[in-house]
Image (cartoon, rainbow, N blue to C red):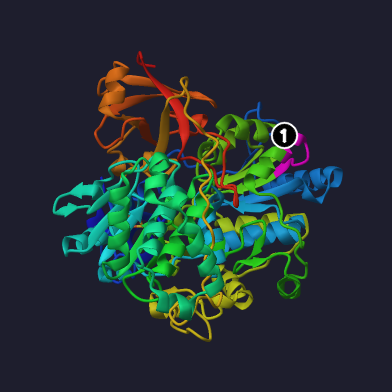
Amino acid sequence: VIEHGQAEKKVTTTCAYCGVGCSFDAEVKGTTVVRMVPSKDGGANHGHSCVKGRFAFGYATHPDRITTPMIRKSIEDAWQPVSWDEAINYAASEFKRIQAKHGRDSIGGITSSRCTNEETYLVQKLVRAAFGNNNVDTCARVCHSPTGYGLKQTLGESAGTQTFDSVMKADVIMVMGANPTDGHPVFGSQMKRRLREGARLIVVDPRAIDLVRSPHIQATHHLKLKPGSNVAMITSLAHVIVTEGLVQEDFVRERCEWASFEQWRDFVAKPENSPEAMEIHTGVPAAEVRAAARLFATGGNAAIYYGLGVTEHSQGSTTVIGIANLAMATGNIGREGVGVNPLRGQNNVQGSCDMGSFPHELPGYRHVSDAATRALFKDAWGVEPQPEPGLRIPNMFEAAMDGTFLGLYCEGEDIVQSDPNTQHVEAALRAMECVVVQDLFLNETAKFAHVFLPGSSFLEKDGTFTNAERRISRVRKAMPPLAGKADWEVTCMLSNALGYPMDYKDPSDIMDEIARLTPTFHGVSYERLDELGSIQWPCNEDAPEGTPIMHIEQFVRGKGRFMLTEYIPTDERTSSRFPLILTTGRILSQYNVGAQTRRTPNSMWHDEDRLEIHPADAESRGINDGDWVGITSRAGETVLRAVVSERMQPGVVYTTFHFPESGANVITTDNSDWATNCPEYKVTAVQVTRVTQP
Ligand code: SF4
């Protein structure tokens, strides 16, 4: 029973689920949050919320929360509750022992988008200064790392270009590989408002998402492409724009590298890149692609919104580059109503990348090989970061199997459930000698841990999150940490025990250090955030109020750079044994691996992952709606309940990935993006057969 009428105080904070970053007033009674009310002053949500955020306090006090540190010598042993000091000292001594025996690079850390900016900053600092290597990575590796790469290469900054409110000035909205009404519901509603006002919609997706046809909304074009053919599609759209004279040449001449444009123009104009030639790959009639390209180029302000259906492919970075090419060629960048808009899945994916949690980049996306940047950090930290990039998450797993990577500090990320090829991840963790998990619950990864450090939920901590529109918002403590320590304090304790002192008064102190060392954050402080409500970076001497729209006068890299997008089909192929393609996505009431939403009764509207299958594929297999089906891939097998649906195209099946029992990642492959190793979750060849109930 929620007695919200008796709340004693309100604390304004930020939702810890998706990348919209809604602002809420958490109403508190005693030491418990009893209600979350969306804040009218929230820059991203303007008083709106979705079911996840509204009930996000449910899991914070769930009985599954672990509030005592625990250790065990072997993963076969039972957990032993211990004091904080004992757990930290044990972890530190194990890390030191491993490094003494196997070398500096034999340990590393993984941080998460669930962490605040301040916490993530500390994890990468711990790895770089206390571990002495660059073996740090983040869950963005498995979602938007191609965004970071592709947008940096073309536009000069690893971030989306717009505010959410910008959509209200769009005349044409292209949604590619995203499902905003489920994945980013508050922004999805805002987009629907604009569509109901008359903006036209192009959906590029293998599945008919809700936006394709919903009350008062009908997509002008649904390019229902085959999974894995994004690059073929984006290149053939570009072909039409170039060969039909629809390029905004004045914009390109003034704002972009002309030589790179000419090279790209000549490439996309080749007959083999036409919609007709690409039809065999995309499966979309060429006339439909031509009509969509014309609408995009001539329909007024055109904005592109994309999600994991773009990034989680072996050519994820190439598609991001193709999207940026399209925006530049049509002059749709640098003002309201246009732009390149990655819909970041998690609350702080943007921030986690901004804070330098990639093995090759220090905070502010500066490469570790840059001597001047390293010198700056050496001055501040007293330790110079290593000049060579460290291990990415998949490389850590490979090194573990080789016996050269044996210690891992993992904060806020359930890698066993969220990373591809679960069997391989589990084998790698088993091969390690010390796995330290810092989390709310004994998650799937904790089954392989030797030290468990209780984490704190967003309601128990101070800090900041940065949403998909680069908006930095305060996270404020509404209740004390259940385990007595905030996550940032735990990281400091571990660093101190390792012999590298970390001494901060509070998270504001950490943000001040971030601001000193990061040019795009120079103007950010908790005082400024309290004053302005939220700030979109860059916020510095040039932009003291922040930057809602980027690349207005010029691109961050100076001139925009076109890059070629050659289509290379994925290695994952259908065969007579695996004739269907499985692709994945999210559902409104659940969130990612479900660790929080599955423990929040109010959002239990969907209590299992299901497999959507086209009626023709279902009929040929004797599958009826609601039947149990076995899904087998080259990597593994699982069982789900079937939903027979016209949303699917023949030959393609779809599931969500919120429940560990369904094990969607047991069947996904090892394929990954060529530039960033982002896993190819969206294309797995499978067979589906009717089975009896498991
Ligand atoms: Fe807003 Fe996303 Fe939280 Fe829903 S899940 S309330 S859309 S931030």
Residue at 22% across, 54% down: 220
Point out the quarter of the image occupied by ligand 1: bottom left
Q: Is mark 1 within 8 Å of ligand 1?
A: no
Point out residue 420 in the picture as x, y percentages from the top left corner. 54, 37
Q: Is residue 448 visible?
A: yes
Point out residue 458 in the picture as x, y percentages from the top left corner. 45, 56
Query: In which quadrant will I find the N terminus?
Result: top left
Point out residue 382 in the picture as x, y percentages from the top left corner. 77, 70
Residue at 27% across, 25% down: 616
Q: Quadrant of residue 226?
A: top left
**Residue 250 versus residue 586: which sits nearer the camera?**
250
Q: Is residue 399 above or below residue 74?
A: below
The amino acid on which the numbered mark 1 sits, given as a three-letter code, is: Met
Q: Secondary structure at mark 1?
A: helix
Query: In which quadrant will I find the C terminus?
Result: top left
Q: Is residue 541 left or right of residue 373?
A: left
Q: Is residue 60 above or below residue 368?
A: above
Q: Is residue 51 visible?
A: no
Taking the magenta stretch, the answer to whether it contains residue 380 is no
Residue at 32% across, 58% down: 293
Q: What residue does disc 1 label?
A: 401
User: From which residue to which does the magenta span run?
Assistant: 399-407
Q: Is residue 179 above or below residue 338?
A: above
